[in-house]
Amino acid sequence: MNASTRLMLVDDNDLARSSLAEALQTEFEILALANGDVALTKIHEWLPDVVLTDVEMPGRNGYELCDAIKRNEATQHIPVIFFSHQDSIRERMVGYEMGGDDYLKKDCDLAELKFKLNLSAKRSRQSRELKASYESAQSTALEALSTSFELGKAVRYIEQSYACSEFEELGKMLARFALDINLSAVVMFVSRTGLLFFTSSGKDTAPLEAQLMEKLHSRDRFVDFGCRTLVNYPQVAILIKNMPLDDRERYGRIKDTLPFVMGATDAKVRMLDAEKALSLQCNELTSSIEAIEMTLETIKNNYQHEVSGISTIMAELRATIAMDIHKLDITLEDETHIVELIESTGRKIDLFLQENSSTEDILNNIVELLQRLTKEQNRIIVDTLASSKVEDETIMGDVELF
């Protein structure tokens, strides 16, 4: 048993609770409880690493238990996983609204359940380790950010984003911008290779957050639920988890500033995606040209070998006829005719070989054309990246930030 990982299991079904506790006891130190009210009284003294709770229970249900845990400063870092027979998007959204970290169906595989519990426990430990530094960062932030301060941060972020050449660099920069204006955020990029997630806290994205952002990405530009706002653009989305509902002025400023930042980020993500696709295409084209060159070299060698063989055969034929034609019982006129016929045929063969040698020239021209295209494509990529960096350095030197 892994005594360092504490699991609080809450389920009003005695048989289900005891069966699940027995299945998990080899990997977790388990406290199994029958309802949310008892769990809430025990959680402060036992302090589990993760809570696994049923949703539908008499008295305090799973959602209410999670809400109470997350509202208490002493326990809000503890991850809560819902374990239910229900699996609708509405159920998941309610679970997320209450502060849940994940949502699993009760018929899920035991291995998946263990994996999710261990992952959440790991995130819980990370949360405790980061809590001190996070609170320190919060204490140094301004209580009220003026419009010029937020706009200045936004302008600086956009200027610095010009020089980004990797998705990870840009994603971390956008998440850091959110943290700089005292917002807790999750960033999602939509690239050709898939979805990429980044957080302002530096922790891994919670599974339920990633699921909801993906499912809600195709909806409205702004999706508001509780103190959370999801801002959607085609290539990027950002989930703000602590919108200031009690400060309507700042709330409005944030909603005015985010589209300015997100529009620039969306264009940058699109450009990075295109650059990487173009670079991949160049690499594939270069490989194809190399394969063509090897094939052409093989064709050339085979052709030269065939020409040499035909020339040798014709030379041997001429020599043989010259030596043996007098042995034939034919007239001098016939001998001359035969020799001329053979010489004429030889010349036709030589002419045929010379005419077909143009095939090699055509293939060489194709290879040279592809090589020029590849070089030009690489030059465009290099020049584009270089001009972006120069433009960024110029702007950073000329523009005075707030």
Image (cartoon, rainbow, N blue to C red):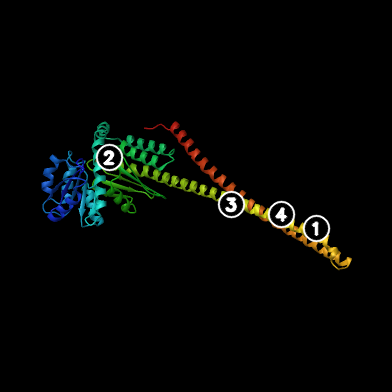
- Distance of mark 3 from mark 2, alpha carbons? 62 Å
- Distance of mark 4 from mark 2, alpha carbons? 86 Å
Q: Is residue 159 left or right of residue 116?
A: right
- SS at badge 4: helix
Give 315 or 30, whichever is nearer the viewer.
Answer: 315
- Distance of mark 3 from mark 1, alpha carbons? 40 Å
Q: Position of residue 302 (x, y in %)?
A: 65, 54
Assess whether mark 1 and mark 4 are in contact (beta carbons under 8 angstroms).
no
**Which residue reaches farthest front?**
327
- SS at badge 2: helix
The residue singled out by tag 3 in the image is: 292
* Three-letter amino acid code of the residue under disc 3: Ile
Q: Which mark is residue 308?
A: 4
Q: Earlier in the sequence, mark 4 or mark 2?
A: 2
- Residue 335 figure quarter: bottom right
Q: Earlier in the sequence, mark 2 or mark 1?
A: 2
Assess whether mark 2 and mark 4 are in contact (beta carbons under 8 angstroms).
no
Q: Earlier in the sequence, mark 3 or mark 1?
A: 3
Check the picture and name the quadrant holding the N terminus.
Answer: top left
* Three-letter amino acid code of the residue under disc 1: Ala
- SS at badge 1: helix
Q: Position of residue 391 (x, y in %)?
A: 47, 36
The residue singled out by tag 1 in the image is: 319
Q: Earlier in the sequence, mark 4 or mark 1?
A: 4
Residue at x-position 41% and y-position 45%: 269
Q: Earlier in the sequence, mark 3 or mark 2?
A: 2
Residue at x-position 52% and y-position 41%: 382
Note whether 399 is above or below 7 in the view shown: above
The residue singled out by tag 2 in the image is: 250
Q: Earlier in the sequence, mark 3 or mark 4?
A: 3
User: Counting other residues with Cα less than 10 Å from the Cα at mark 1, is it few (<14), some (14-19), or many (20 or more)?
Assistant: few
User: Counting other residues with Cα less than 10 Å from the Cα at mark 3, is it few (<14), some (14-19), or many (20 or more)?
Assistant: some
